[in-house]
Amino acid sequence: MARKGPTPASSPEQVISIVGPGLRVVGDCDTTDTIRIEGHIEGSVRAHKAVVIGKAGRVNGDIHTQDAVIAGTVKGSLIVESRLELQATCHIDGEISAARLQLEEGGVVNGTISVGRKDAGVAIDPGAARADRSKGAGSGQTGKVLGVGGKVKV
């Protein structure tokens, strides 16, 4: 039986751009929606909604987005306006700035992390985090974390 009426087009809110396995992009990527990276990007990535990087995905460049889930490798800065999830298989080399951060056990971060509002920074490093908590530190956290292997929810 045939359908009556036109087939609805996919709405712009549901668009996901995909850089598939085996695909290498040299240059900057910019989307008003979400981008999923399973291949390799040499350049910056800007997504107004979200960036998802799979286990085999790699980005050599800066990322700026609303939300991000990263299981692969990033060499560059990450600026996430809302929520950043770093999965156990991730490897990040660079600066991270996010309103909220979740780092699963096994994830590796080499660089500077800034979490929370930009005006509420508190230094964290392997030894100073305990001392800052005892002093009644604020909710925003900034500092240098190398080779993180624990579960962190901020």
Image: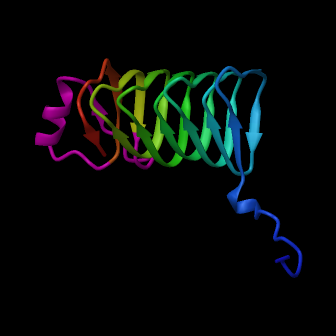
Residue 95 vs residue 15, the one in the foreground: 15
Residue 22 occupies quadrant: top right
x and y percent of residue 125 in the render? 26, 25
The answer to whether 105 appears left or right of 25 in the picture is left
Q: Residue at x 39, y 26 (%)?
A: 89
Residue 122 occupies quadrant: top left
Residue 138 vs residue 46, the one in the foreground: 46
Q: Is residue 116 magenta?
A: yes
Read off the magenta span. Answer: 115-139
**Rendered view: 114 above or below 99:** above
x and y percent of residue 55 in the render? 49, 27
x and y percent of residue 86 in the render? 41, 35
Q: Residue at x 67, y 30 (%)?
A: 20
**Rendered view: 49 above or below 37:** below
x and y percent of residue 120 in the render? 37, 47
**Rendered view: 118 above or below 74:** below
